[in-house]
Amino acid sequence: MKKFKDFFVDPTFNNSLEFSSVDVTFGVYSLSVRFDSKDVVLSARYQGPLNPWMSSMCYLIEGKSLGELVRFTWKQWELFFQNDQTFWDYYDEESRKFIFEPLELLFASLNVYQGRDYLYQEESPLVCRCFGVREKEIRDFLQTETNPTLENLVNNSKAGMGCRSCVLQLKRWLMVDNDKKNNRYFKSRPAADWLLDIDRTLADFPKALDWKMEVSLLKGNQVTIIFDKEVSQREEELTGKELQDFLGRSVDLDLSFFLRRARHFSNAKG
């Protein structure tokens, strides 16, 4: 049985792979995976600086089926190296990184291999960007877990352990605070905190950059988003609905988001 310290010097998995089924590059690393006809990993290799996390991941995923890989999390490392002190010495720092490249590469590879990218699928949007946890995984957890608490979800998937911007959404799904579920959450925090959260989330809206969208005003439960782009009235209306769904789902369902042209908003204020 391999020890975690072996992966610091073992170059076995740090080379190219011929006849790969999928190749994905993220940052300085490239991951290559070859599947057999039954969607089981025959071999996995990576290119880039020698990295014990990349090497150990390639080792751990070999022999696993596609179904097992889509549920691959930190739990697999924890179980395999549970009695390995070297692993635990490095684990805490690595698991808290905002983006963990090995898992990002693995999930990107699975998406490409399956011919789809979950980032752009409404049926399974990305919820926790830090650890690549998607809505489908959370729904599966709720359906199969006998005690679906936030603590159990975090331990199972690491969702919410990074920047924590997804914790509010996770709490709603899990109904952690049942006696407050009908209250308006936007009243529970200062407006400045909400504006920061909205601004950060708005940056991930697909049209935000092209439309030059900016958070302009929070009054009561109404948020005004201004934009500066020449579009038709119909396109503005459709995008406004998309924005309400996107921000409401990600920030707070009790907030209402209104899209306004920058010049119109300026005139209204004047």
Image: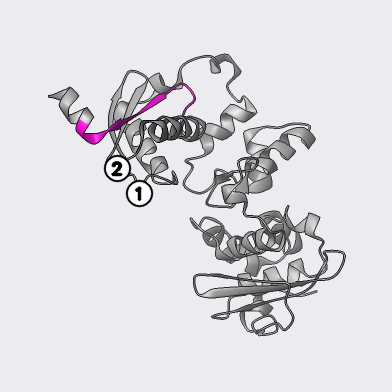
- Which quadrant, please, contains the C terminus? top left
Q: Secondary structure at mark 2?
A: loop
Q: Which residue is mark 1?
A: 210
| Nearer to us in this view, 138 or 247 | 247
Residue 232 position in % (x across, y down): 36, 35
The residue carrying pointer 1 sits among few (fewer than 14), some (14 to 19) or many (20 or more) residues within 10 Å by Cα, namely few
Q: What label sits on residue 63 in the rendered view?
A: none
- Residue span colored magenta: 252-263
Magenta highlight on residue 261: yes
Q: Please give left or right for residue 131 compared with residue 61 in the image.
A: left
The residue carrying pointer 2 sits among few (fewer than 14), some (14 to 19) or many (20 or more) residues within 10 Å by Cα, namely few
In which image quadrant can residue 260 be found?
top left
Which residue: 72% across, 34% down?
142
Q: Which residue is mark 2?
A: 229
Three-letter code, disc 1: Asp
Work out how far the residue at label 1 is from the one at label 2, CA to CA, in angstroms.
Answer: 8 Å
Q: How many marks?
A: 2
Three-letter code, disc 2: Lys
Marks 1 and 2 close (CB-CB < 8 Å): yes
Tell me: residue 135, above or below residue 32: above
